[in-house]
Amino acid sequence: MQKGSIYVPGLVVAILATLAATYVSDHYGAPLTLMCLLFGLSMSFLADDKRLEPGLTIASRTLLRWGIVLVATRITFSQILQLGPAALLAVIAIVAITLGSGVFLARRLGFTAAFGALCGGAVAICGASAAMAFSSLLGERRTSQAQLTLVLVGISAMSALAMTVYPILARHLHLSDVQAGFLLGASIHDVAQALGAGYSFSQAAGENAAIVKLTRVALLAPAMMVVAIFLPKDPDAKVTSPILPWFVIGFFGLAAVNSFGLIPPVLAEGSSKTAGALLACAVTATGIRSNMKSLTQNGLKPLLVIVITTLIALGLSILAAKFLIPG
């Protein structure tokens, strides 16, 4: 058997399951990440088949990392500058405090700092995509597939709830279109849900939510750099130098290239769609590789980290929208 062919069975299973999840998502309006997770978890018994292991591993790791790099085609530095200094500083502060809160809460609840970074990073930046990115950075020795899957489930549920509730909250707070767009873009986890909530409020709110949300996505690489510095691969090792993984460097580089307009719009759009497909396949493969028994061994306690950091991000976003963003 040729070396490359060992990946085929697992990749085929992951791709077919992702296509089925995409069909259900498209036809019933369910979040794609949640559908990929559910399809993956329903097939987790296949993880015991050694023939599938190489392909599932490459789908949950390598495809994920290339997806993270291609996410950068959604971002230009000019979009970030459109926010203005006050809003930009507010977004950076919200991301930093939310990420730090995740680590603090996890330690207080008896979990590792790595698990806290996984939860806090997912809530602070871009939901499932950030969770996958931080998991890849931290490695399976510190954040298991079961922990990642639990975070993905919690993030998907909270993001779907936020998309429904937050626009109502924004109206109740009598926020302007610009303020509501900031609130929704700064606090909702996944990109699709943030934009959906923004445009459900108004066209102007949707456009502003898109800029704020993409600014949070742009902070993925800097946040990962900070985590790489303060949480080295060997938990007992001292930090020597901030060596970044290749996919974080690739994210920075591609965002810079895109900011100079060197990527044609058609190619950028195709790259963005490819990123979504790769990340969806990685989520499905993660679900298949997860051990269902280990998902529930700590009960609902791990989800408290996600819920509390979500509320922190929401509270900070409301304060910034009310007092820093012009009405």
Image (spheres, helix red, strand yellow):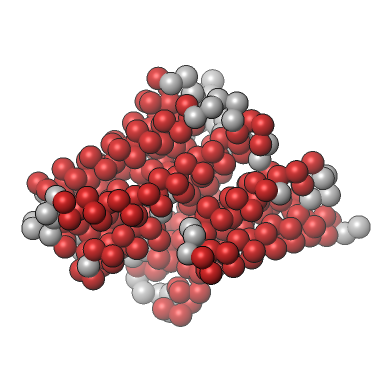
Residue 107 visible within the image: yes
Quarter of the figure that contains the C terminus = bottom left
Q: Is residue 308 above or below residue 186?
A: above
On screen, residue 317 versus residue 154, left or right, reads left
Q: Position of residue 168 (x, y in %)?
A: 24, 54
Give the tally of numbered discs.
Answer: 0
Quarter of the figure that contains the N terminus = bottom right
Q: Position of residue 86 (x, y in %)?
A: 14, 51
Q: Which residue is at a point 40% across and 45% down the rendered structure image?
A: 158
Towards the viewer: 97 or 149: 149
Towards the viewer: 157 or 128: 157
Q: Which residue is at a point 51% across and 44% down the rendered structure image?
A: 153
Q: Position of residue 23 (x, y in %)?
A: 59, 67
Q: Which residue is at a point 82% across and 55% down the rendered structure image?
A: 6
Residue 62 visible within the image: no
Q: Position of residue 26 (x, y in %)?
A: 52, 68
Residue 297, by quadrant, is top right
Towards the viewer: 3 or 195: 195
Residue 64, by quadrant, is bottom right
